[in-house]
Amino acid sequence: MLRNRVLAAGIIGVAAMSAVAASEGTAQEGTAQEGTRAITCTNPVSGASWQIHVDYGKATVDANPAKITRAAISWFDPTDGSNNTLDRQTGALTASAASSTGGYFRYARCGVDKSR
């Protein structure tokens, strides 16, 4: 009887892990885009611009692991310690970074794909 309970608990655990893995995969695959894309972002105050490189197939931004959904792309950039979120509908990029004085936010506007 104890063996049956342990076996049942194991089966439930495997099913739960499979459901989580499937839902995470759906968020990545649900973007309906493959390959890579360079997106130009601009600081609205200074006018400085730069590009980020999104690889939808590998789920990376500038070679950093990213979470890509239909609504947003989020990633951590270890070069400056910032957490970044790009709103895919509006192109609003928000970066938050911790510092010894409490941290700060940076904002930019990025080109987004209007064809979706």
Image (tube, rainbow, N blue to C red):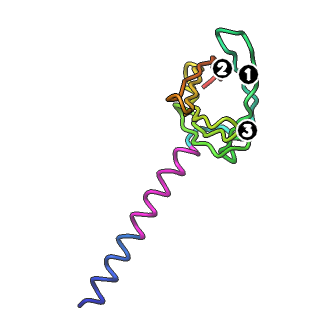
8 relative position to 49: left or right: left
Q: CA distance from mark 2 to mark 3?
A: 15 Å
Above or below, 44 against 1 in this view is above
10 relative position to 88: left or right: left
Q: Residue at x 70, y 9 (%)?
A: 46
- What x and y, as percent, mark residue 59? 65, 45
Checking the image for residue 109, the label placed there is: none
Tag 2: residue type? Cys
**If you read the primary sequence from the N terminus, does the residue marked by circle 1 or circle 3 appear first?**
1
Give the residues drawn in magenta, as a range.
14-29
Q: Secondary structure at mark 3?
A: loop
Checking the image for residue 40, the label placed there is: 1
- What x and y, as percent, mark residue 97? 57, 32
Tag 3: residue type? Asp
- What x and y, as percent, mark residue 47? 72, 10
**If you read the primary sequence from the N terminus, does the residue marked by circle 1 or circle 2 appear first?**
1
Q: Secondary structure at mark 1?
A: strand
**Which residue is at the front of the view, 17 or 92?**
92
**If you read the primary sequence from the N terminus, does the residue marked by circle 2 or circle 3 appear first?**
3
Q: Residue at x 49, y 56 (%)?
A: 22
Q: Residue at x 62, y 18 (%)?
A: 108
Give residue 31's quadrant in the image. Answer: top right
Residue to which mark 2 is pinned: 110
Tag 1: residue type? Thr
Q: Secondary structure at mark 2?
A: strand
Is the Cβ of the residue at disc 1 closer than 8 Å to that at disc 3?
no
Q: CA distance from mark 1 to mark 3?
A: 13 Å
Q: Residue at x 69, y 16 (%)?
A: 42
Q: Quadrant of the C terminus?
A: top right
Q: Is residue 112 magenta?
A: no
Checking the image for residue 62, the label placed there is: 3
Is the Cβ of the residue at disc 1 closer than 8 Å to that at disc 2?
yes
